[in-house]
Amino acid sequence: MFKGKSYFQTGYEGRCIRFAHAKKSAGVATTAYSFGMSTRERAEMARRITAALNATRHLTTDQIEAMALEVGQSTSKEPVEEKC
């Protein structure tokens, strides 16, 4: 569904991710409401999301999830506990 799409970072303080080649620039994600992060962290996370989406645009979601499983990363919506 999203294979081949490109994305760009925009919005207030760079907190939004949008489709790059849409007639209307549809929103994809935002870190605007991530109040546990600083302003700088929100912009950096939006940058990271944009980079990851663009780096994997040639892959399907199933392929991305399979890659994540290969390196031992969970793709579930359940939070993963971090060990300190």
Image: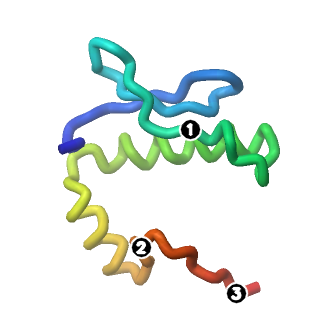
The front one of 41 and 27 is 27
From the image, tell me which residue sits under label 3: 83
What's the amino acid at mark 3?
Lys
From the image, tell me which residue sits under label 2: 76
Q: Are marks 1 and 2 in contact (CB under 8 Å)?
A: no
x then y, percent, for residue 24 = 34, 14
Q: Are marks 1 and 3 in contact (CB under 8 Å)?
A: no
The CA distance from mark 1 to mark 2 is 20 Å
Mark found first going from the N terminus, 2 or 3 = 2
Looking at the image, residue 29 sits to the left or right of residue 43; the answer is: left
What's the amino acid at mark 1?
Thr
Mark seen at residue 69: none
x then y, percent, for residue 26 = 38, 24
Q: Are marks 2 and 3 in contact (CB under 8 Å)?
A: no
Hey, which quadrant is residue 18 in on the image? top left
Residues packed near mark 2 inside 10 Å, few (<14), some (14 to 19) or many (20 plus): few
Hey, which quadrant is residue 28 in on the image? top left
The front one of 52 and 77 is 77
